[in-house]
Amino acid sequence: MKLQVKFRKFTLQKLHYQSITLNMQNTSKHTNRLIDETSPYLLQHAHNPVDWYPWGEEALNLAKELDKPILLSIGYSACHWCHVMERESFENEKIATIMNKYYINIKVDREERPDLDEIYMSAVQIMTGSGGWPMTVFLTPELKPFYGGTYFPPEDRYGRPGFPKLLIAVEDAYRSKRTEIDEQAEKLVAHIKQISNPTSVKDLSLDNKIIEQAFYHYQNTFDSQHGGFGQAPKFPPGMGLSLLLRYWKKSGNSRALHIVEFTLEKMAQGGMYDQLGGGFHRYSTDEIWLVPHFEKMLYDNSLLTVAYLEAFQATKKSFYREIAEETLNYILREMYDQQNGGFYSTQDADSEGVEGKFFVWTLEEIEQILDQAEAKIFCDFYDITDQGNFEHKNIPWIKTPVDLYIKKTNINQTDLLNILDRCQKKLFDVRDKRIKPGLDDKILTSWNGLMIRSMSLAYRILGEPQYLEAAEKSAKFILTKLVQKNGHLLRTHRAGKSHLNACLEDYSYFITGLIELYQANFDPYWLTEANRLNQIMIDQFWDTENGGFFFTGKDHPKLIVRSKSAYDGATPSGASMAVHVLLRLAILLNQPDLKEKAETTFALYNDNMKTAPSGSAQMLCGVDFLIDTPKEIAIIGDPSSKQTQEILRNINRRFVPNKVIALLNPNAKDKQKIEELIPLLANKTSIAGKTTIYVCQNYACQLPTTDVSKLDELLHPEQHLIIQ
């Protein structure tokens, strides 16, 4: 904390402002170096008068050669305030002239380069106490940060200095206080290294208490009136809800289930959920989930789909299934490359330069589309009024749940749902003709891995073939288009070009998707690829000295810090998902050393899991898997037979999160190879030619059965094992 105070003091006292007159050059028609990039975010800035460089040797060498500070600007295409800063500052020729004169200006898409974002976001958070995007960081030519922030307005506003004034002050400090700046930058880098490489606890002891402590943390921050946790702004807590479901499953604590259900219902009823088109916006700006930041991210919709699918398994309530289906159908409709496979990254918050314009309505618009009687019911149900609920317009949301609305209005439930369904379709068709928000159509290996997992899980639980087809097609796309000649993964693909080294999250997310895909169709190819990539992940990212996974691989370009991170924020950390992979492959492939690596990882982040469980939700799901002694389910039978399909449906409809499933067709030509790949299946036979179920724990199996009705007994957590 002393270091943080010191940085704040420095920024206030040393970066004094002065006025300066510059010879302004007209660069409005200038095309900068970003024009050759594939990232939609970088291409958005390719015609700025700023002389932008992409991150690379040309820019970094020039900074050293000219001894100029680097202005590093990091954002992403769907970011509303990134667009604002571009319009206000980066398209402003006078501001661009200041930038071009004094700085080497580098623009980075955080979705392409999470390695850079992670390091320099840590720096900004240390210097200012907060972070966000757009992120603006000033670096020495040695790439060491010495000042930074997020959005800066073109003139003094919101308690922030005007950007041109700041640019001049920083450059003046860089020249006149160089020694002090270099010292501060060194201290800052040392601090980042310290917090980015945790120390392992010596005696790791994991039990149910750590999961219970997490539950109490969530309970203490739970908003019992509106759902979710804490105050506005509220972010969708998909991983936290999955953790709470696991705690409920193990403990029977009804309060945990209530927190999950209430939050899922409130989010899906709010304006953060697209009531007409399905899918979730990024987060809610208020506590009641009404007004979102309107961008839609692939990862949010993936993580939330998992939470709704698991809630459906746990409660059998159709509402959760419907939200999951609507969300996945939205993804397939608008965020999926139907021809080649692959899921796109984001949809913008803005259309026609206005945030949320595509999604909001006036009362008059709706009354012109719907007939009078339908319009009255629709507007009443979705809170559409003349004065509006968002900047004089309306975000459709369910202010009163269906059951209470029926009591209030005495409308028959079936009639109400039919009316609302007709109205939604009419309004959706009209809305679909509007100018749509921008689409960032780059395909990221990591986020595709998350969605492959969601689609595969949805197929297993809901049985819809389109979800399996999309998962298979996207996995094939990644394995065809984003794999290097040496078998290593690349991170991003767009416009026919794949490039950039994959980070830890690319491997761990994608391998997770492959494991889930194997458990959906039992094609051993997916598990073979998961095993191959897992070995690369360990070779490239595992810290052989202290344990744990680095953010970047051994072959990655060298940065100022090679960090480790296990923070489960908007997305799970690469380390948390790596643990997910290790624990499952340890069982499926009979590789005990993988389990040991998972335990070593837990030891590194033991303190984080105890003190900040909401930032460790995915990691704690891994702990729950480990201590729960997961079920090892082996099925011997023809996967296409009715009996096998009935058994799989019966297993998949249950909420048994801590399990792995493997299947062997006794008539398969490559039977021996499958048994060698998956020892769990070895030496197991079918009974009387019928599909046979083996339920094991720690490779000790209960008596096999062909009777589906015995699954309750076999999967009961208190059942004693009968060792063969």
Image (cartoon, helix red, strand yellow):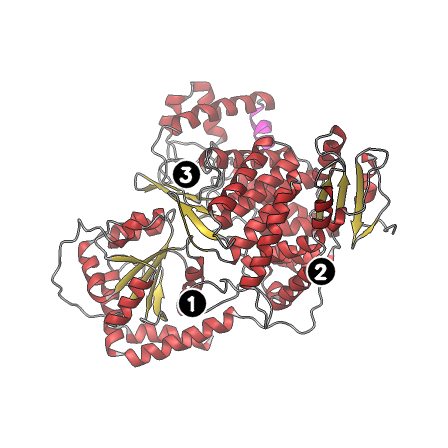
Q: Is residue 311 visible?
A: no
Residues at discs 2 and 1 in contact (Cβ within 8 Å):
no
Q: Which residues are magenta?
A: 403-410
Q: Secondary structure at mark 3?
A: loop
Q: Secondary structure at mark 2?
A: helix
| Residue occupied by mark 2 | 592
Q: Secondary structure at mark 1?
A: loop
Identity of the amino acid at label 1? Lys
Residue 389: mark: 3
**Pointer 1 local density, CA inside 10 Å: few below 14, some 14–19, many at least 20:** few
Cα distance, mark 2 to mark 3?
56 Å
Q: Residue 372, percent across and down? A: 43, 19
Residue 558: mark: 1
Above or below for 157 versus 7: above
Q: Is residue 277 visible?
A: yes
Q: Is residue 407 magenta?
A: yes
